[in-house]
Image (cartoon, rainbow, N blue to C red):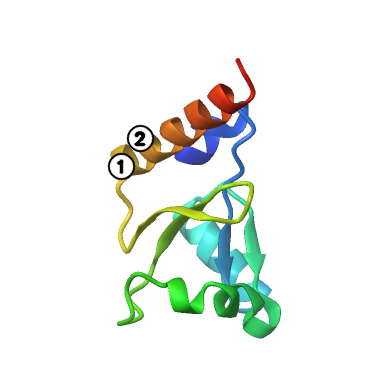
């Protein structure tokens, strides 16, 4: 089960974001069999928003970021590590639940 599928029912949203063309991204998604939404960062707005926060200035791709609902980066890595990512998501969900008194 993917991270996207694992947390979807808990309100977690997972997106791939790229500045490639829609047709390139569709081909890439189909080739890899991805099910998550892929967003096009037209004008590099998202990349510029987080530019100074990139943890890997070498430009290594892909780069994984978990961003909280208030826009703060809570996890970052330049390779996919599902256990580390799941732990970060679980911690954020726990923090949210504690703040809301659940």
In the image: residue 20, left or right of residue 3: right
Question: Residue at position x 45%, y 37% from top?
Answer: 89
Q: Mark 1 points at which residue?
A: 84
Looking at the rendered image, the quarter that the N terminus falls into is: top left
- Compared to 38, does 91 lie above or below? above
Residue 25, horizontal then vertical, whole percent: 58, 69
Mark 1–mark 2 distance (CA, rounded to whole Å)? 5 Å
Q: On residue 55, which mark appears?
A: none
Residue 102, horizontal then vertical, whole percent: 60, 15
SS at badge 2: helix
- Compared to 34, does 100 lie above or below? above
Q: On residue 87, which mark appears?
A: 2
- Compared to 102, does 18 lie above or below? below
SS at badge 1: helix
Q: Which of 19 and 94 is in front in this view?
A: 94
In the image: residue 94, left or right of residue 85: right
Task: Let me know if residue 37 appears in the view.
Answer: yes
- Compared to 87, does 38 lie above or below? below
Residue 93, horizontal then vertical, whole percent: 52, 30
Q: Are marks 1 and 2 in contact (CB under 8 Å)?
A: yes
Question: Residue at position x 42%, y 33% from top?
Answer: 91
Question: Residue at position x 43%, y 31% from top?
Answer: 90
Q: How many labels does the image show?
A: 2
Question: Residue at position x 30%, y 42% from top?
Answer: 84
Residue 54, horizontal then vertical, whole percent: 41, 72
Considering every residue shown, the one lying at the far top of the view is: 102
In the image: residue 44, left or right of residue 67: right
User: In which quarter of the view is residue 30 placed?
Assistant: bottom right
User: In which quarter of the view is residue 48 placed?
Assistant: bottom right
The residue carrying pointer 2 sits among few (fewer than 14), some (14 to 19) or many (20 or more) residues within 10 Å by Cα, namely: few
Task: Let me know if residue 1 appears in the view.
Answer: no
The residue carrying pointer 1 sits among few (fewer than 14), some (14 to 19) or many (20 or more) residues within 10 Å by Cα, namely: few
């Amino acid at each position: 089960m993917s991270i996207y599928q694992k947390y979807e029912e808990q309100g977690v949203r997972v997106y791939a974001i790229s500045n490639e063309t829609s047709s390139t991204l569709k081909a890439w998604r189909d080739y890899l069999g991805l099910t998550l939404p892929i967003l096009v960062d037209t004008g590099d707005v998202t990349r510029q928003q987080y530019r100074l926060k990139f943890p890997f200035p070498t430009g290594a791709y892909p780069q994984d970021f978990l961003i909280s609902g208030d826009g703060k980066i809570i996890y970052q890595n330049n390779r996919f590590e599902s256990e580390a990512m799941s732990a970060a998501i679980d911690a954020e969900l726990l923090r949210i639940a504690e703040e809301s008194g659940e």
